[in-house]
Amino acid sequence: MTSEGLQGADNEVFRGAPTFSNERAMMQDQPYRIMIADDDEDIVDFIDTYLIDEGYQTVRAGDGEQALNTFLPTLKSDAASDRIHLILLDVMMPRIDGFEVCRRIRKDSTVPIIMLTARTEDVDKIVGLELGADDYMPKPFNPRELLARARAVLRRAYPPDATDEPSKSEGVEFGTIHVDLARREVTVGGKMLELTAKEFDLLHFLMKNRGRVFSRPQLIDRVWGTNYYVGSRTVDVHIRRLREQIESSPSEPEYIKTVWGVGYKFAD
């Protein structure tokens, strides 16, 4: 993949101007930083140039090991300028593949991840999503579609602090579980949970519709949407992860109930 203006590009790990006027690429006056992890330099250059033109800052990684060594230290930094807000993660990378990188990152972070791959097997998409990826982009791709997906993921993960955003009172509460929609935070007994974007969306949807039974296809349609390839197994995995965090006994759930032969519901 090629793009104009790539000749003479330097090999710096960090690129991008710190100031610009594109509000869609901003988070509270700070530009979003996006890591591009791919061993194909042409693709990295192409995405890098496109994102910078749109006002984003970028961080580059040429293999899975470099991606982890670049991202994980940022979790210990209090500097806003060090934060990485989104990872574009290739599946087939040397040293450590994208699936393993995603798995290790999910141990410590809910940073949004979009998987990139030239592999078209459905099982690869399912594995990536079940490991905690937020979206999946097959190669070759239209850069405008990639940008649109990146913006959608960023909007869900980092809703702006604005007067037209949902207030805390518009959250959902049941028992000791509180879902703050504006901050996209979930607490159980006052303890903050670490949920991925889709785990949050699924929990919020079920709690908002307490007592109503939803089939797996209905949950896929309402929570993931038609732009995602998601199977029933993905729903089950997300339900299991939620139970592990909100239930005192995940094997005997009090909140998220299984309705055998139909689907799931949140207790009313």
Image: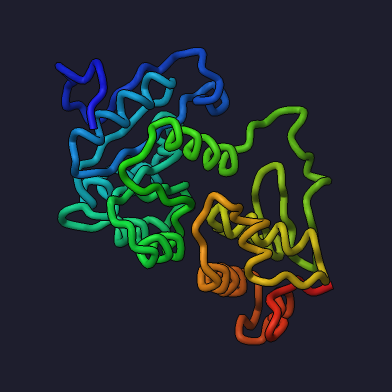
In front: 242, or 7? 7
What's the coloring here? rainbow
In front: 41, or 68? 41
Image position, residue 219 (x, y; %): 66, 64
- Horizontally, residue 205 falls left or right of residue 91, namely right
In front: 70, or 78? 70
Query: Could you tell me which residue is drawn at 40 percent across and 46 percent down?
Result: 75
What is the quadrant of the N terminus in the image? top left
Query: Could you tell me which residue is drawn at 73 percent across and 70 percent down?
Result: 214
Query: Could you tell me which residue is drawn at 15 percent across and 16 percent down?
Result: 8
Reply above or below: 25 against 19.
Answer: below
Reply above or below: 124 against 151.
Answer: below
Dividing the picture into quadrants, the one containing residue 263 is bottom right
In front: 89, or 33? 89
Image position, residue 27 (x, y; %): 54, 28
Image position, residue 267 (x, y; %): 79, 74
Query: Could you tell me which residue is drawn at 20 percent across and 26 percent down?
Result: 12
Number of numbered discs: 0
Image position, residue 226 (x, y; %): 58, 52
Dividing the picture into quadrants, the one containing residue 246 is bottom right
What is the quadrant of the C terminus in the image? bottom right
- Horizontally, residue 43 falls left or right of residue 227, namely left
Reply above or below: 253 against 124.
Answer: below
